[in-house]
Image (cartoon, rainbow, N blue to C red):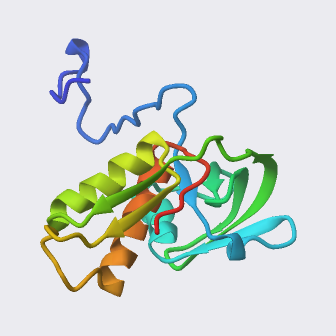
Amino acid sequence: WKASGDPSRGGVSPGEGRRMKKARGSEDCFFASPQSFGEGGLAITGSEARHIAVVLRRRPGDTVCVLDGRGGRYSVELTECSTEMIRGRIIEKQEFSPRTPEMWLAAGIIRAARMDLLVEKCTEVGVGAIFPVSTKRSLSSKGVSDSRLARWQRISVGAMTQCARVSSEAH
């Protein structure tokens, strides 16, 4: 749309906001660990809760897609929205079996930014597990730190939710 203030030219008048509609079938998906699920509902905390409540401005009554990273995809009606916690009622649950054959990748440790990109893109195309390997020509002979592994796990979850994959296992 045009940002000009002239409505006759297809623009938006000052104070008149437009909410762009998403293409059909391209709903936002969010991640919730399997421990977040309870009897017929779930609770999401942390950065995902803030993203849903503040950035996307979702309110009670809205429906979102939630992935558990283990093959479950849930349609959830939000019942409580705050920056600290999102609570919802599960409307529908779909279980998907893992792909066979499962793809695994053993990758030599490369520069941090490149390794981040490798983890993201491999998750998007369906690699089931990524194993960083320290080789003779690796940049780091010390191996991989716990903080780096945690970062790769976050990147993997982000890539999984972005492309609505139902499972993600980054090792």
Residue 134 x %, y %: 26, 73
Camera-side residue: 63 or 60? 63
Side of 42 relative to 45 (left or right):
right
136 is higher (above) or lower (below) than 120? below
Camera-side residue: 167 or 39? 167
> For the point 37% across and 34% down, which residue is it?
18
Number of callouts in the render?
Answer: 0
> For the point 47% across and 61% down, which residue is it?
157
28 is higher (above) or lower (below) than 48? above
> For the point 53% across and 61% down, which residue is it?
169
**Residue 88's image quarter?**
bottom right
53 is higher (above) or lower (below) than 8? below
Side of 159 relative to 64 (left or right):
left
Image quadrant where one finds the N terminus = top left
Side of 69 relative to 170 (left or right):
right
Farthest right residue in view: 39
**Residue 80's image quarter?**
bottom right
Farthest top residue in view: 8
Camera-side residue: 125 or 107? 107
Residue 65 x %, y %: 63, 49
Residue 97 x %, y %: 74, 45
Residue 101 x %, y %: 62, 41
Camera-side residue: 131 or 6? 131
> For the point 54% across and 57% down, which residue is it?
168
